[in-house]
Image (spheres, rainbow, N blue to C red):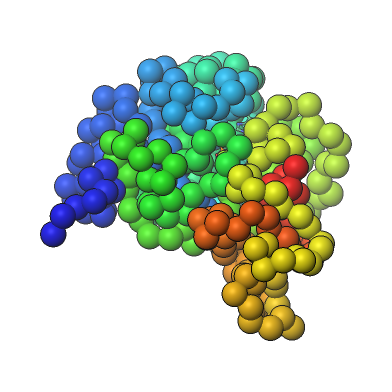
Amino acid sequence: MKKIYSNIYSFNKKTLKKTVKSLNLGNIASLPTETVYGLAGNAYSKTAVKKIFKLKKRPSKNPLIIHYLNLNNIKKDVILNKYFLKLYKRFSPGPITYVLKKNKSSKIKSIATANLSTIAIRFPSHRVIRTILRHTNFPVAMPSANLSTSLSPIKAQDVFDEFKNKINIIVDGGQSKFGIESTVIDLTGKPKILRPGIISSNEIKKCLNIHLSKKKSTIRSPGMLKKHYSPGIPVIIGKKPTSINHAYIIYGKKFNNKPNYFNLSKKANLKEAAANLYKIMRKIKNSGYKKIFVVKLPNSGPGIAINDRLKRASK
Ligand code: TXA
Ligand code: MG
């Protein structure tokens, strides 16, 4: 049978070897994680990091998250603290990113972290990225595998649609379980959420037994850019569509089935809604709809993360 996507690989020993070799050479591969797919490169290699920024068309002032297997290899790169250790024990590996102070001995290339004195680190739980991290002797810088400001990919095909053959290896790890980017928490001072995610501020508060900071952050983050996560067509929140040429994103079971209605979760489950968000937005865009209307969603738990993405998509 003719192979259409010559750069999408299913995960096996051969793919592992090929991917590790490619990363060792300073090349970029797209890898699956439990949140979204990423563009991975050796965080200790300037060449590799530069390639990531170029591919994504990402502004150089927007820092990347550095991905590690476990605690063993981070001490040279960041300064640990008690909040981090508590959260790590409770939530990692998993969909949470910690911003910590950079260690002077760190080998992380400063362009990866936009010359900041901090580094964002994450310990992904997806089997594929963990296996790859086990076979490399460097951490992996990895932003979401989409062009700057557009929707994050949650399957190999999404990455291909965005970059075609500009990436040599896209490892297929199935659909990302959570479907939305990790929670980013700044732990360099009083803990503060920089980007809401599946792990909610309430869960974090409970774990640390403190209140989180609500102060406006001075740190520039692309996740903080007002326009982001854009499907490329207008998104209108809290209104109903007036035409069948407009898609309507709904939630819960009180809606009838209509061809232009897309339900994030019939069961009204916010976790399921988050996992479906980008998938549904892509589907709507690819079906040729010119506008997206969205119902108002509950603003609690994962709903906070969904509303954050929708709000930015609507800018
Ligand atoms: O779930 C995720 O986190 C995915 C997967 C691939 O791991 N990655 C991801 O990366 O979403 P990216 O680059 O699309 O978003 C990284 C976010 C941005 O908002 C960035 O500004 C913030 O993390 N960030 C990175 N380093 C930071 C730092 N030192 N201080 C503050 N924010 C930082
Ligand atoms: Mg991103």
Residue at 47% in and 54% down: 154
Q: Quadrant of the N terminus?
A: bottom left
Q: Position of residue 284 (x, y in %)?
A: 57, 60
Q: Position of residue 183 (x, y in %)?
A: 64, 48
Q: Quadrant of residue 263?
A: bottom right
Q: Position of residue 304 (x, y in %)?
A: 75, 57
Residue at 81% in and 46% down: 212
Q: Position of residue 125 (x, y in %)?
A: 45, 53
Let me know if residue 106 appears in the view: no
- In the rendered picture of this protein, how many numbered marks are placed on residues? 0
Q: Is residue 312 above or below residue 167?
A: below
Q: As drawn, is 16 to the left or to the right of 133?
A: left
Let me know if residue 315 appears in the view: yes
Depth check: 4 or 242 in front? 242
Q: As drawn, is 124 to the left or to the right of 2?
A: right
Depth check: 182 or 239 in front? 239
Q: Quadrant of residue 300?
A: bottom right
Residue at 49% in and 49% down: 153
Quadrant hosting ligand 1:
top right
Q: Quadrant of the C terminus?
A: top right
Q: As drawn, is 5 to the left or to the right of 298?
A: left
Q: Is residue 29 above or below residue 241?
A: above
Residue at 72% in and 81% down: 255
Depth check: 306 or 159 in front? 159
Q: Quadrant of residue 256?
A: bottom right
Q: Which residue reaches farthest left?
A: 1
